[in-house]
Amino acid sequence: MISRRLAVGLAAALLALGACGQPAAPAKGQDTVTFSILSTESAQNMESYWKPILADMEASTGLKVKPFFSGSYSSLIEAMRFKQTDLGWFSNQSGLEAVRRSGGEVFARTFDPSGTDGYKSVIIVPAASKLTLDGLLKCDKTLNFGMGDKKSTSGTLAPMTYVFVPRGIKPESCFKTVLSASHDANLFAVANGKLDASTNNTTALKLNAYKGSAQAKKVRVIWESPTLPEDPIVWRKDLDPVVKEKLRQFFLTYGQGDTPVAAQQRANLARLSMGGFKAADNSHLLVVREMEATETLGLAKEAGDAAKIAQAQTALDAIKAERLARDAKAGVPVEAN
């Protein structure tokens, strides 16, 4: 007769063997994402603008959404690179860096509520100033000038590409001082006469007026760029595909439709001068890549280095061809390129 202790041991062994033949319990999927947000204004203001949108994202996806605010483009790029963030709202140039260095991928982009597809970089001066673009570019080192972050599309790349590099001008050699700050800070500085001129963009000016602030009325635009593409939304390529699809569905349906809920969502977006989101991919960044390559070519010509000029021209031609092929596939008229 088997002892009670032996019987219990045999039963436990049989249960353990039975468990070996069963599939392992599935690992719990990702239930939290961190969304990075460029603080074009104070983090407190940006948090108030984004809070209802992030709450809607949580409700729609079933994911917990943690915000990550920063006024530094570089910190947003590095945070994604080290997987401290999962997706975020980027400028075009910082988004390009996130794709290059941080395993990022464009999956959506914003659009303007007015229907205008794009925005412009501008140079502003105090409204009462008689300064013109020609006067600005005399480069007599008497003016205080403001620019954006080095990775800002409208604050730095666009004015360098379209204003300074074609004229062989380096801002640091042209002006008395060159200060780097956010669009919001530069707008206030010019409006209050602390800067003689600075870069900015049409969206920042529009938002300032929308909020009833007075600064946009105290400045005057003396230069504007060609139209720049709207901002990309970038996620990490290695995100769980299930999580990606939940996020994709949220962004591409947010603010769409004729329901009261959709109307409220559009009101949330309007505070950020956004009309909603459209599907996109990395080809969205071709325009900023072309601007970047144009600047590189200009600098090579300024240096008079034949090898670098040839290399830069080849790179620029390749990007232009890629953009033209994309636009032809999308049915964009040739004259719009």
Image (cartoon, rainbow, N blue to C red):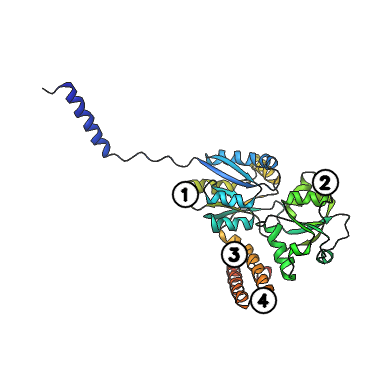
Cβ atoms under marks 4 and 1 closer than 8 Å? no
Give the number of the disc on residue 330: 3
Cβ atoms under marks 3 and 4 closer than 8 Å? no
Q: Amino acid at mark 1?
A: Pro
Gap in Å between the C-alphas at discs 1 and 3?
A: 27 Å
Cβ atoms under marks 1 and 3 closer than 8 Å? no
Q: Amino acid at mark 4?
A: Gly
- Per the image, the residue denoted by label 2 is 214
Gap in Å between the C-alphas at discs 2 and 1?
A: 45 Å
3 or 54, which is in the foreground? 3
* Disc 3 crowd, CA 10 A, few/some/many (<14, 14-19, 20+): few
Q: Nearer the viewer, mark 2 or mark 1?
A: 2
Give the number of the disc on residue 241: 1
Give the number of the disc on residue 151: none
Gap in Å between the C-alphas at discs 4 and 1?
A: 49 Å
Give the number of the disc on residue 304: 4
Q: Quadrant of the N terminus?
A: top left
Q: Earlier in the sequence, mark 3 or mark 4?
A: 4
